[in-house]
Image (cartoon, grey):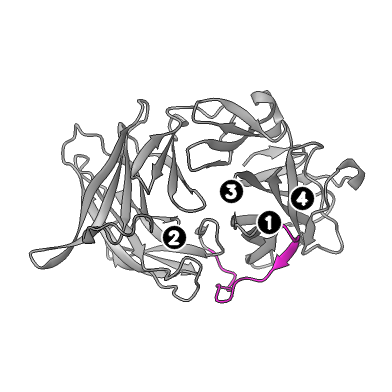
Amino acid sequence: MVAAGLFLSLVFIGACQKTEENPADVNASNGQTAAYVLNNNSGFDTVLNITKNLQGIGTAIGIIGLVDFTAESNTNLNYVYYTTFQSQQSNLFSYYRKSFNIASNQSVALPTGADKSNQAGGYSFFRPYSNFFNYCLLSSNTTAGNTVFTASFKGDVSADFPKRNTIIGEPDMGFLYPMLNSERFPGNPNYDLRQGFLTVGALTQPNSYTFKVCNPKLFSYQFTTNPAVPKIVANFFDISIINKGLSQSKYQDISYSFDLRSDSIFAHHIFDTTISGFEAQGIIRIAGLSVDAGLSNSGNIKKIRHYSPDGKIFGMFFQDLSTKRCWTFSFDYTTHTFSKGIQNAILDYSSDGSDIDIDEFGNIYYSGIASNGSNPNGVSIYRKDISGATSLVGSDNFLKFGEIIQLKFLFGKVYLAVTGRISNTYIKQLTFLKQQ
């Protein structure tokens, strides 16, 4: 999260200072018009403003925040945001799920069958380029020294995972299905034993709300007991409908595991099989690529996944948090081939609060310090491409006031969510911006 101007204070400025089509204002509080957050000639357009009066007890003022958002090919912007309100007893959370059509500049109804409970959790996701929203609830319970872990996905797609006495995996959202990426078992460091859950059968059709229940499938695997072989430091599970017609029956699920080591990355097929009459799962390596030196074996990795709009290309971002250096890769589901993107690179002019996304080819888009890192009071959006070059997206120091809280690259454009407080009021504002 990178802030500009007077941090969270949004100064009210006249429309004559800003030449753009007036964006829609929804949920305006007490007739308060939203503040413009952009400098002139910013290279971005304001899509939507949301304002809320969040005055609590006494001088307390609540928060407006964003859970997640995405865009569809029909120009619908789908988003879930939340507000907090300080009462005498507690801090109250409220969630709001909305859709807004950018082309018509109008709010639109949620799809028939979509979850309208206005709930979210610690891990919340829109399925990319869609109005499918789900969230994951993780819990653990310890009785007499025995700890049990469980997880469940709620919302438009639901899945209840069985209780485990070991790690249960890391919540994530693929192009079609939610899943729990694998995590390494604690214990003997010579073992690379991992466990997570795939989910299958969530959707009969990609845009149908008629079948919402996932079937969780536990997947545990161990590649090596050799301490000289680098261990897996990060993993993505995924399921693709591309190549669904492969002749081998064991590939019909088209489940994948992408496993990153400090020296290589591999794509594996996961398939159902039978061994001595018992149901089991197998794994076959289908592609691999060397990783440029510099990635540590600590496992302290930030990960981002990104898909092409048709789901045929899967982009992966890995940042070693111990060094802040980044690696990106691209996997083509049609040809089953990897491509290298950025390798062992620093994000120029970034900060600890930078918001980051990638495209399917591994180019990185991120918020950073304006004026090539020399203006700590300003914010710019940068693109680091796979050749290693860094360039501006929009204008330098484009943001007049506010704090960027999310950045996404969708349909060839950077989208931003910005929050702030309108000066001398209890009104908080959430603004969505789109690259021109």
Label 4 neighbour load within 10 Å: few <14, some 14-19, many 20+ = many
- Asked if residue 132 lies left or right of residue 47, the reply is left
Q: Which residues are magenta?
A: 103-120
Residue 116 sits inside the magenta stretch: yes
The residue at which mark 4 appears reads as 421
Marks 1 and 2, how far apart at CA = 29 Å
- Per the image, label 1 sits on a secondary structure element best described as strand
Question: Of the residues shown, which amino acid type is indicated by label 3?
Answer: Leu
Question: Of the residues shown, which amino acid type is indicated by label 4?
Answer: Arg
The disc, 3 or 1, on the residue closer to the chain's N-terminal end is 1
Question: Of the residues shown, which amino acid type is indicated by label 1?
Answer: Ile
Question: Of the residues shown, which amino acid type is indicated by label 2?
Answer: Leu
What percent of the width, then of the height, locates residue 238?
37, 54
The residue at which mark 3 appears reads as 410
Marks 3 and 2, how far apart at CA = 17 Å
Predominant SS of the magenta segment: loop
The residue at which mark 2 appears reads as 176
Label 3 neighbour load within 10 Å: few <14, some 14-19, many 20+ = many
